[in-house]
């Protein structure tokens, strides 16, 4: 069986299927004490609300995009999650000192057995729905969402409805051979992660994913964007040939790895890497990175359950500085919110997370997160050429407030006698407001870097993770190009460099257009660097 979707990260892989969400959750505890009953009843209620809320959001989104029938499935799941009889059966068990996670699974099994025994085929098939919903409530109670990924111990192709950055961040190195997801686009974070990891990804295959969840083996082709469940021997042989051809293609680009790329007119374009952790630094150098154009520091925070201390962050930034030596590293301050949750921080649910408490907005409101990070970067700047970049800036006031906070941290470190280095500060241009006010921001910035992923999403009002909006997830749109041009002109007038660190920077068809508009640096997933240098050199 073949599924087609969006080719989000090129490469091919064949491997065992890993489906994180379908494993039957095992309760962490079977019993509770009398004293815990009230608190556990409350936790159960909150878990039901959270699961029903997520399900109804998915239903609303499907309905809004015209998928009435699929939305109906989610409505049914919401009803099931909120079913008063189910709740009272679970509550009764909790009062009998059963843990809520065990109780909800047990009641789910009872209901499922009743449905399965029905003659009507439609009703019988509802058994899986009950298990699914009660399993989600149980997982919610155990805060288990992410741990399934940590448990992945055999290199596998991961099949999932969607993959949050905190999911992919928890997968151990080498354990994911490829990703196939129902949701997502080329600029959703799962795609970005796949490209950095150099593994194939097919996203946005839709609900058809369900048809292959039982597959033992899956073959993924991430350029065209398709996946084949339980491929036969001929298909496996064909994938081996494709893999060989790709390796040849990559070998032919080898000679560009360490080229300093210039256009035929002699314009030098720096080509740098986007990284998410110190472990990617060596690999980035290997691919020919002339620096780090974007260090997404939030991944340091997401691959664990608690927050990294200032010292731990210092170690991480300093480790990258030591690998890159004199080469510049643009460290982006925490950009959580949107689709990136932070374990260990209480983020209230938001109606519109991508338009919500994200990036610099959250950092400015949370000095206990922001200041240790700024201090750690200032300290690590003594070990290399670190620059600080603020994400999601919408106006000069935010930039000034962030710089004031940096100044405060610098003064404090100086008075403590701690060794620090010089850092330039720059702004990520990823809101239309920032692009429109680029002239004002340039007066206060040492550099710009254009985040086309968000700039596209906010300019075209098109959710970057929604597989149905593919046509609009494209930086090569006149409105986006006009904002990029405006940003480049503002940078040029102020005499500051302007990079692109969104996914468009690594796309061969976009590179000449960005360079033409005046971009001076391109930053991308490291494996894309040699090809980008070739495209620039041939321009
Ligand atoms: C962007 O928005 O283009 C960007 C590079 O940031 P992120 O993808 O991490 O939001
Ligand atoms: Mg962004």
Image (cartoon, rainbow, N blue to C red):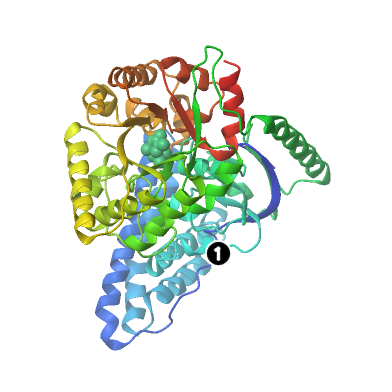
- Residue at 31% across / 35% down in the picture? 426
Disc 1 is placed on an element classified as loop
Quarter of the figure that contains the C terminus:
top right
Image quadrant containing the N terminus: top right
Side of 246 relative to 271 (left or right): right
Q: Quadrant of residue 402?
A: top left
In this rendering, is residue 122 above or below 182? below
Q: Compared with residue 413, is residue 331 higher up or lower down, i.e. above or below?
A: above
382 lies above or below 355: below
Q: Toward which corner of the image does residue 242 lie, by quadrant?
A: top right
Instruction: Say whether residue 348 is visible.
Output: no
Q: Position of residue 403 (x, y in %)?
A: 21, 41
- Answer with the quadrant where ligand 2 appears in the image: top left
- Find residue 304 and report its horizontal and vertical position in percent: 42, 62
Residue 450 makes an appearance in the image: yes
Q: How many marks?
A: 1
- Residue at figure coordinates x 24%, y 78% from the top left: 38
Q: Residue at x 83, y 41 (%)?
A: 234
Task: Tell which residue pokes out farthest to the top in this image.
Answer: 265
Does residue 355 appear left or right of residue 150 in this picture? left
Nearest the eye: 445 or 175: 445
Q: Pick out the residue farthest to the bottom.
A: 34
The residue that disc 1 covers is 23
**How far across and how far down the image is residue 358, in percent?**
28, 44
Q: Residue at x 68, y 30 (%)?
A: 255
Label 1 beta carbon within 8 A of ligand 1: no
């Amino acid at each position: 069986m073949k599924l087609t979707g969006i080719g989000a990260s090129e490469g091919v892989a064949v491997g065992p299927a890993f489906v994180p969400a379908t494993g039957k959750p095992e309760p962490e505890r079977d019993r509770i004490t009398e004293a815990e009953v009230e608190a556990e009843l409350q936790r159960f209620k909150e878990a039901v609300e959270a699961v029903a809320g997520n399900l109804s959001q998915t239903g609303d989104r499907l309905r809004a995009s015209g998928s009435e029938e699929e939305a109906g499935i989610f409505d049914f799941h919401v009803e099931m999650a909120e079913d008063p009889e189910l709740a009272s059966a679970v509550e009764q068990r909790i009062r009998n000192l059963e843990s809520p996670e065990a109780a909800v699974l047990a009641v789910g099994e009872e209901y499922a057995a009743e449905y399965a025994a029905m003659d009507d085929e439609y009703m019988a098939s509802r058994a899986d729905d009950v298990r699914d919903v009660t399993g989600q409530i149980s997982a919610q109670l155990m805060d288990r969402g992410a741990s399934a990924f940590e448990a992945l111990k055999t290199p596998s192709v991961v099949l999932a409805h969607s993959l949050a950055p905190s999911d992919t961040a928890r997968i151990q190195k080498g354990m994911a051979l490829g990703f196939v997801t129902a949701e997502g686009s080329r600029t959703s974070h799962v795609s970005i992660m796949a490209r950095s990891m150099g593994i194939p990804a097919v996203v946005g295959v839709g609900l058809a994913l369900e048809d292959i969840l039982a597959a033992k083996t899956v073959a993924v082709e991430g350029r065209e964007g398709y996946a084949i469940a339980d491929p036969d021997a001929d298909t496996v042989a064909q994938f081996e040939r494709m893999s060989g051809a790709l390796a040849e293609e990559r070998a032919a680009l080898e000679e560009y790895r360490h080229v300093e790329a210039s256009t035929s007119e002699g314009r030098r374009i720096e080509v740098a890497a986007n990284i998410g952790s110190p472990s990617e630094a060596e690999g980035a150098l290997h691919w020919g990175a002339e620096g780090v154009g974007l260090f997404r520091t939030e991944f340091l925070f997401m691959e664990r359950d608690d927050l990294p201390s200032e010292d731990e962050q210092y170690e991480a930034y300093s480790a990258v500085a030591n690998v890159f030596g004199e080469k510049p590293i643009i460290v982006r301050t925490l950009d959580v919110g949107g689709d990136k949750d932070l374990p260990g921080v209480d983020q209230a649910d938001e109606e519109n997370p991508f338009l919500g408490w994200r990036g610099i907005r959250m950092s400015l409101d949370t000095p206990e997160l922001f200041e240790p990070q700024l201090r750690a970067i200032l300290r690590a700047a003594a070990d290399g050429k670190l620059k600080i970049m603020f994400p999601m800036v919408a106006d000069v006031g935010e930039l000034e407030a962030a710089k004031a906070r940096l100044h405060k941290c610098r003064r404090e470190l100086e008075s403590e006698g701690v060794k620090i280095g010089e850092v330039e500060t720059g702004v990520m241009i990823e809101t239309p407001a920032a692009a429109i006010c680029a002239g004002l921001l340039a007066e206060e910035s040492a550099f710009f870097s254009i985040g086309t992923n968000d700039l596209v999403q906010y300019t075209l009002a098109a959710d970057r993770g929604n597989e149905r909006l593919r046509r609009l997830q494209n930086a090569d749109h006149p409105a986006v190009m006009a904002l990029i041009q405006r940003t480049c002109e503002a940078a040029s007038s102020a005499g500051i460099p302007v990079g692109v660190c969104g996914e468009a920077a690594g796309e061969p068809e976009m590179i000449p257009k960005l360079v033409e508009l005046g971009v001076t640096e391109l930053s991308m997933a490291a494996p894309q660097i040699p090809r980008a240098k070739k495209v620039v050199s041939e321009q």
